[in-house]
Amino acid sequence: MQQRGLVPWSDVPVLLVLGRYTQGQTSSPSELLPFLAKDMPRFTHWSVCAFGRNEVACVTAAALLGGHVRVGFENNLVLPNGSVAASNAELVAATPRGYWRIAGLVSSLLPNWQRDGRAQSAERNE
C-alpha cells in the first residue's frame, strides 16, 4: 500500500521498542540512534517504549527528540532508582520528572535561554 502511495510513510504511527525480554531487561537511550539515522524513513508520529530500569532515560530521550512515549508495567517494573514500582502510576509519574530534570539541565547550560523556549540575543543579557 505504501508503494502505491495509499499510505505515505509520514502518516504511519511507529512504536520503537528498546531492549527486550531478557534476564536483567536492559535498554539504553543510545538504542534510539539507529532509528534516527539519516537513511531511515522519517515518521511524523513515533513513540518509544523501553525495557528495564533505564525506561525513563530512554523515553525522556525520545521526548526530547520529538517522539511520544509509552510507559508501564508491560515492559518494566523498576523505577530509575532501582526499586520496584508499587504501581503502574508510579512508573508513569517518574517519566515527566526525568524529562523536566533534563530540560532544566539543558536550560541551565544555555545562559541566553528564556523559560518560554525562545533564545535571547546576547546583547540583551549584557
Image: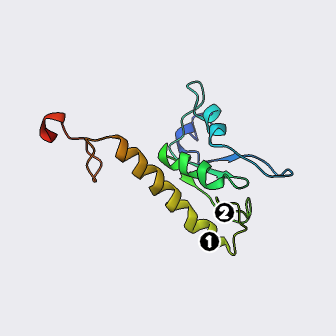
Q: Which residue is drawn at 73% across and 53% down?
A: 51
Q: Where in the figure is residue 126, as x and y percent of width and height?
A: 13, 38
Q: Residue at x 54, y 35 (%)?
A: 42
Q: Where in the figure is residue 53, as x and y percent of width and height?
A: 70, 55
Q: Which of marks 1 and 2 is nearer the N terminus?
A: 2
Which disc number belongs to residue 79? 2
- Above-or-below relation of 37 to 9: above
Q: In which quarter of the image is the N terminus?
A: top right
- Above-or-below relation of 72 to 49: below
Q: How crowded is mark 1: few (under 14 residues within 10 Å), some or many (20 or more)?
A: some
State the separation of the CA atoms marked 1 and 2.
8 Å
Q: Nearer the viewer, mark 1 or mark 2?
A: 2
- Above-or-below relation of 126 to 55: above
SS category of the residue bearing label 1 = helix
SS category of the residue bearing label 2 = loop
For badge 2, the amino acid type reads: Leu
Does any portion of residue 36 appear in the rendered image? yes
- Badge 1 is on which residue? 90
